[in-house]
Image (spheres, rainbow, N blue to C red):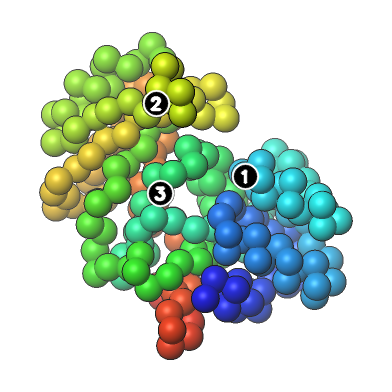
Amino acid sequence: MKRICAKEALRYIKDNSVIGLGGGSTISYLVDYIKESKLNVQIVTPSFNTEMLCIKQGLNVIPSWSVNKISVAFDGCDEIDNNLNALKSGGGIHTKEKIIAKMADNYILLVDESKVSPTLTFKNPVVLEIFEESLSYVESEVKKLGGIPSMRKSSDKDCFTISDHGLLLMNVKFNKVDDIKTLDSNLRNITGVVDTSLFYNICTKALVVSENGVRVIEK
């Protein structure tokens, strides 16, 4: 099904354009299709794995700092709702992903039907990228917002997980969220928080794949 979703995504790519590609298996299939289609595109990506895959395929990867506008960007997520609010929790590169998303005329999430709900369930934690010096302060502030903070640990469990920017990653679990817009604003306004994995009012479309094919959610 992921191949079907990637094939559909290819239709949104214009020749001779700059595009953004996130991470994940669906994106890897899209890389294959871009190569097969012989589209002339320049690619920016927040994902090291995607960058390496594109280079191996002979595609033109450029640094994101070298552009200020992108035609279309594709990514995945852990949850998305019918209002196109999305939540990511896995990779810890959400700040880079948001930079690319904000530069894109069209930011499209590629997901399967199981990840879609009428409104975000927050079954996954919100991930905050924070400065080390702000750790205790951020913990106290998210508790005031009803969050349950915990630090992400590396695979050896002896140290905290850090982002590509060398900053700490904090998981914050919310059992009940009444207002996603307010939560997004409150979290980003905490001093020491660089950004969050909650994507509010950023996505423009979602391609949702199921056994019945691909449907589009758009504003």
- Between the C-alphas of marks 1 and 2, the distance is 20 Å
Residue depth check, mark 1 versus mark 2: number of the one nearer the observer: 2
Using the rendered view, name the quadrant where residue 111 is placed. Answer: bottom left
User: Mark 1 belongs to which amino acid?
Assistant: Ser
In the picture, measured across the screen, residue 44 lies left or right of residue 168, that is right
**Image quadrant in which the C terminus is located:** bottom left
Q: Nearer the viewer, residue 1 or 143?
A: 1
Quick one: label 2, few (<14), some, or many (20+) residues within 10 Å?
A: some
> Closer to the N terminus: mark 1 or mark 2?
1
Instruction: Say above or below: 112 vs 27.
Output: below
Which residue is the site of mark 1?
47
Which residue is the site of mark 3?
88
Q: Residue at x 22, y 46 (%)?
A: 182
In the picture, measured across the screen, residue 145 lies left or right of residue 139, that is left
Q: Position of residue 30 (x, y in %)?
A: 66, 66
Q: Position of residue 171 (x, y in %)?
A: 32, 34
Which residue is the site of mark 2?
153
In the picture, measured across the screen, residue 205 lies left or right of residue 145, that is right
Q: Position of residue 81 (x, y in %)?
A: 31, 65
In the picture, measured across the screen, residue 120 lies left or right of residue 2, that is left
